[in-house]
Amino acid sequence: MSTFKIEGGHRLKGKIQPQGAKNEALQILCAVLLTAEEIKIDNIPDIIDVNKLIALLKKLGVKINKLGKGSYTFKADDLNLAYLESPEFKEDGKGLRGSIMIVGPLLARFGKGYIPKPGGDKIGRRRLDTHFEGFINLGAKFRYNREELFYGVEADKLKGTYMLLDEASVTGTANIVMAAVMAEGTTTIYNAACEPYLQQLCKMLNRMGAKISGVGSNLLTIEGVEVLGGTEHRMLPDMIEIGSWIGLAAMTKSELTITNVSWDDLGVIPSVFRKIGITVERQGDDIHIPAHTDGYEVQNFIDGSILTISDAPWPGFTPDLLSIILTVLTQARGSAIVHQKMFESRLFFVDKLIDMGAKIILCDPHRATVIGHDFKSTLKATTMTSPDIRAGVSLLIAALSAKGTSIIHNIEQIDRGYENIDERLRAIGAKIERVEGN
Ligand SMILES: CC(=O)N[C@H]1[C@@H](OP(=O)(O)OP(=O)(O)OC[C@H]2O[C@@H](n3ccc(=O)[nH]c3=O)[C@H](O)[C@@H]2O)O[C@H](CO)[C@@H](O)[C@@H]1O
Ligand SMILES: C=C(OP(=O)(O)O)C(=O)O
């Protein structure tokens, strides 16, 4: 396990380019299984989760060619489906959350899809019911081996139908869409998730010959087609990374420009940061954050009551940025409540911020009240362990703003989703070192 050593309290300055979106990449990579033709994908982030999925696709027999940084071609014309029933797959499939999305495409094209209980962040219950109920609605037979935690679906031919999802699951919607594109007849999915990740997936599938309408809404209509062909696709910049850098700039009082952010795909993200007093300026397709030398002041609601920031399915605020918002609030002028509705174990990392001197009351597993210091007291450096990807980056931001040298262990959790983070942060002036293997 590696560690970051961070000397906090320095201002950063410069430009930072967000990587390609992790959660989009995981969907798009699974979609290459839907065709025997070649697919070219650009702006693939070089991060642990994505590399694990690429390795899994390779073992499954996908021909993969790396053309340059972030640019690959994939050709799934001769797959080794026996791998899906091997002990090796039972290990590989567990390695990340995104692997669950190979099931829909395999079911659509080969009539069977298997997956061990997938990994990902340990942030509370992460059920898969939406995925499998969707496949069952399309006519698949489902089985679950409780001992081995191994899921399977099989079908001779999937049949389109109407379905109302019991929750707008992101990976669930992607999986069902990929299963339905080659089903017989029309599938209608209501209460579909509609994050930019999914919009990008649907646009790519349509370029491959699929007939999906309603893209960007929670009502998708999919007319099944016989076969899909090749295409090219480019990943959007990672909106969670963009939000992380906005928070980093404010909390370290740094002037930063986040370049080529694809503003129109950021939804409410800029306005939520503005609500906690951060100046987020649009400059073309860049975000400019001026140095917040006088701090940042949390807005109350119109009636004067305390601000609550909570997550919601898109176009609501993504849960993946709440840990960062919470951390940045610890130095705001004013107070706010952070309400993490989706995951019940994602706020426990606040104990580490409290150790650093932050004023936070964890009201229950879902809600925390944060009373900002307004920089009258800086956080103190400490030694901590990164519990999950977003808590990890939040602690990294806290460490960069703190006085003294902090140590963060288990940084594989951060590398899972942030490409070359130490090198990129050093380029804007951060004092961060990677210490391998301790
Ligand atoms: C690989 C990937 O893409 N991971 C993302 C994906 O995970 P993932 O697709 O696994 O998450 P889901 O969208 O299925 O659900 C996340 C959690 O929220 C709950 N839930 C979901 C929908 C809803 O309407 N109400 C509700 O309460 C679910 O019960 C679950 O506990 O979406 C999550 C929610 O944006 C993000 O945190 C993850 O980063
Ligand atoms: C929770 C996340 O990832 P995963 O779903 O891969 O665990 C995340 O990206 O914040």
Image (spheres, rainbow, N blue to C red):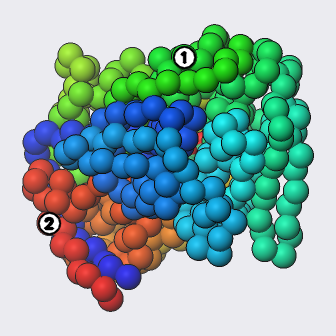
Q: Residue 189, relative to residue 435: is it above or below?
A: above
User: Residue 392 placed where, x, y %?
Assistant: 42, 63
Mark 2 neighbour density, 10 Å: few (under 14) some (14–19) many (20 or more): some
Q: Nearer the viewer, residue 261 or 47?
A: 47
Residue type beneath disc 1 = Gly
- Callout 1 secondary element: loop
Q: Is residue 164 above or below residue 248?
A: above
For the residues marked 1 and 2, what is the alpha-carbon distance in whole angstroms? 49 Å
Quadrant of the image where one finds ligand 1: top right
Q: Name, please, the residue furthest toward the bottom.
A: 438
The quadrant the N terminus occupies is bottom left
Considering depth in this image, is 405 or 59 the residue closer to the camera? 59
For residue 424, the mark is: none
Residue 28 coordinates in the image, percent (x, y): 48, 37
Whether residue 139 is visible: yes
Q: Where residue 357 appears, x then y in whole percent?
A: 41, 69
Residue at coordinates 78% horizontally, 74% vertically from top-left?
Answer: 148
Q: For mark 2, give the secondary structure.
A: strand
Decide if ligand 2 comes within 8 Å of the CB at mark 2: no
Q: Is residue 112 left or right of residue 297?
A: right
Q: Which residue corresponds to the image point at 72% horizontal and 56% vertical from the top-left?
A: 114
Q: Total marks drawn?
A: 2
Identify residue for label 1.
209
Q: Residues within 10 Å of mark 1 (few under 14, many from 20)?
A: some
Residue on which the image places disc 2: 431
Q: Is mark 1 within 8 Å of ligand 1?
A: no
Q: Residue at x 31, y 42 (%)?
A: 72
The image quadrant that residue 394 belongs to is bottom left
Residue at the image position 22 percent from the left and 62 percent from the top: 422
Residue nearest the observer in this picture, 201 or 83: 83
**Spot occupied by residue 226 in the image (x, y as percentages of width and height):** 67, 21
